[in-house]
Image: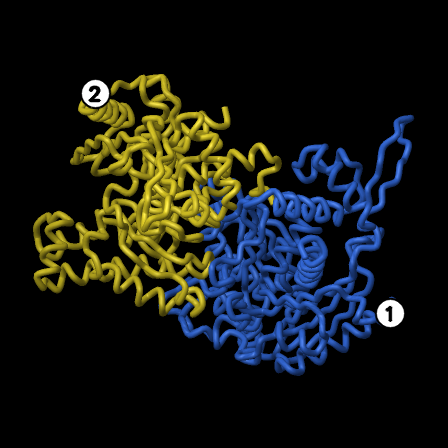
Chain colours: A yellow, B blue
Amino acid sequence: MAGIPASTASLRAANTRRVLEALRRGPASQADLARRTGLSPATVSAIVRTLTAAGSVQVSVATSNGRRANRVRLGGGPLAAGIDVDHRHLRVVVGTSGGSGGPVLAERAVRLATDLTAAAGLDTAIRLLDDALTSINASRDELAAVAVGLPAPVDLRTGLVGSSSILPAWVGVRAEDALRERLDLPVVVDNDSNLGALGEMTWGASVGRRDSAYIKASTGIGAGLVIAGELFRGRAGTAGEIGHTTIDENGPICRCGNRGCLEMLAGVPILLRLLEQAYGRPMTLPAAISRARAGDAGCARVLADAGRHIGVAIANLANLLNPEVIVVGGELVEAGDMLLDPMRTVLRRYAIPSAASTAEVVPAALGERAEALGALALALDKAEHLTYEG
Amino acid sequence: MAGIPASTASLRAANTRRVLEALRRGPASQADLARRTGLSPATVSAIVRTLTAAGSVQVSVATSNGRRANRVRLGGGPLAAGIDVDHRHLRVVVGTSGGSGGPVLAERAVRLATDLTAAAGLDTAIRLLDDALTSINASRDELAAVAVGLPAPVDLRTGLVGSSSILPAWVGVRAEDALRERLDLPVVVDNDSNLGALGEMTWGASVGRRDSAYIKASTGIGAGLVIAGELFRGRAGTAGEIGHTTIDENGPICRCGNRGCLEMLAGVPILLRLLEQAYGRPMTLPAAISRARAGDAGCARVLADAGRHIGVAIANLANLLNPEVIVVGGELVEAGDMLLDPMRTVLRRYAIPSAASTAEVVPAALGERAEALGALALALDKAEHLTYEG
């Protein structure tokens, strides 16, 4: 019940955002927009009129098969930035909902050898952001909003990382406040898997799906949940913590303080440690994946076992939530079906039949950019919120 | 996005149902109704006018502390029935949203020694229903709708039980069609835990809570999920299958075909089998609970271990969904804190701190009637749907 807008004004605002979200996938006729959003043609028409008057969309008339059809495209929308902070990389994208060649205007990424402190992470992010802005002759004060993803649960009630041990470098840091002070811009912070889910539902593998899950399989393992077409964050804002699903009650101690968590069985550092033990020297994940592809049984087994363990957790998730599609992202998905086939097998074996048969398991369409693009989508959403709801 | 009503007409219908739901908790002033529903006073006033004209509510004016205040109550709403079919009992409630002493007008229940076949289950349900109707001088043709709960996943796409092995007696039976044919009335069928969740959110421990879970701990173990104030059923309609969470990958084979499911560690028949082994003779659950209460260490341990196992599953659920409250029902909750305290301990230990600190664990306020009352709530909802949306 609380999901239903309480007044016509907020209904109108919500519908306006739906139309803008639909247009972010590309230009469309008003009839297409009605189909994409489920809104009535009359509602779409009224919203397009308002948006045209505000300069947010442009309507052109094209002739196709001798018939005239209008075509609505985003026009000169606000500029926003998405930032993805991961243990092993940092990525910044700058974009607008008005771009004709897709949303991204500039993009910068760096690989990291070790976790950065919060201060160093913010410094690096701002440096990349300025660099990206410069490349398109833009400046910070043209940005309408910035969104940042962190690889940890973010307690939306406090703005703090929701566990003192999952991302120690950021404990006690209100990333939102810290970045807002330094940039003097509206800032939102969210969990990186939530943003991966948002990226894939906006431009990727789960576009148009009502209930879906996004799994980020990387150093940590997290899930972003989409329920009834909306990102679901839970009461504390930390929903989707699939990496701390207990797989083995007596398993190894996890950094979260529990035992036998999924991350301790399928997180990338654990897999690399197993391979180092077996091969007598350190190995990177890309090296392990190409060896597995070339027929190395040990590397293939480690990837397959990781898929099996994640499969147990997604079977429980499927039993609980019945998603239509489970999108797998994060660096581990570079292993492709060597990872996904064991996941699918375990899902079919461990989930009840109606749940298993509903849930398709597919790789992220946006690859390792899913989280940063999701951050851009969130920032554009924030910018539209500020514009259309005050 | 799909959760947002697409037109003003459906918004109005949804708001009307919210007002009726709020009134089902008891008579209220229009100001109270606005608070209970989150709707504006003007919207509430317009809806009350329409409902008064339709004869669905009655408005009286009372004087309190020298001030006149209106008082809205349900008046002569439709009659509906809720039926809860369990492995060990069958319960029928007949009620109306217009009752001044609560919704239930008549109630009948029987205990069962063994599972009934689908045909025998339907026969018994109809006999109890007729009996209950006779006791209030009513007949079947006065019923606007009937809802039935089954202790199995119900695939809402097919109307069939969503697993061929969880409730074998009902496989291939379209309970909805079978009952509709025999009663010639609108019928809806749902999973019993979903109905327990609906009962508790309408009249019980989770009234007014946005995100909650209801756990039915009985022969099987199921969960009903409430997300953003709405019952969440998932794509297949079989969400909440917590009983088939894998707790031990190498554990005992379960009737669902997997191993080490929660039900195989904490379902009532398993607990009774453990006690029979230990004490050398069969024991009922009520007997085990009273022995535990009197200090019997073996009985107390079996109940506490069941609580611990359910605790692992609800910790995973809390990590995934961050509910505000977890309501525990089913016959096992008669053990009270002997069951719930170990659940709370394990929840705090296994869930990440932000999820654990959000989720309160409480016993069902409606006890073993939660599922039948939830079925009544669903039937009343169906009846209102038929009345106000055609």
| Quadrant location, the N terminus of chain A | top right
Residue B296 is situated, as x and y percent measured from the top left of the image, at: 62, 64
Q: Which mark is residue B135?
A: 1
> Where, by quadrant of the figure, is residue B113 drawn?
bottom right
- The numbered mark at residue B92 is none
Q: Which residue is mark 2?
A: A137
Q: Position of residue A368 (x, y in %)?
A: 23, 44
Question: Percent position (x, y) of residue A332?
Answer: 22, 51
Residue at (58% x, 42% y) in the render: A4
Q: Is residue A109 visible?
A: yes
Q: Work out whether residue A55 or residue B242 is closer to the camera in this orientation and state it.
A: A55
Between B134 and B30, which is closer to the camera in this rendering?
B30
Helix, strand or loop at disc 1? Answer: helix
Badge 2 crowding class, 10 Å Cα cut-off, few under 14, some 14 to 19, many 20 or more, is few
Q: Report how many numbered discs are placed on residues in the image.
A: 2
- Residue B368: in sight, yes or no? no
Residue type at mark 2? Asn
Q: Is residue B226 left or right of residue B320?
A: right
Residue located 74% across and 68% down the image: B92
The quadrant in which residue B7 appears is top right
Within 10 Å of the Cα at label 1, are there few (<14), some (14-19), or many (20+) other Cα atoms?
A: few
Do callouts 2 and 1 point to residues on the same chain?
Answer: no
User: Which of these two is toward me, B126 or A42?
Assistant: A42
Q: Label 2 vs label 1: CA separation? A: 81 Å
Up-down: is A87 above or below B185? above
Residue in view at x 66 percent, y 62 percent: B371
In this picture, is A188 found above or below A371? above
Q: Chain of mark 2?
A: A
B290 above or below B100?
A: below
**Which amino acid does the dot numbered 1 rest on?**
Ser
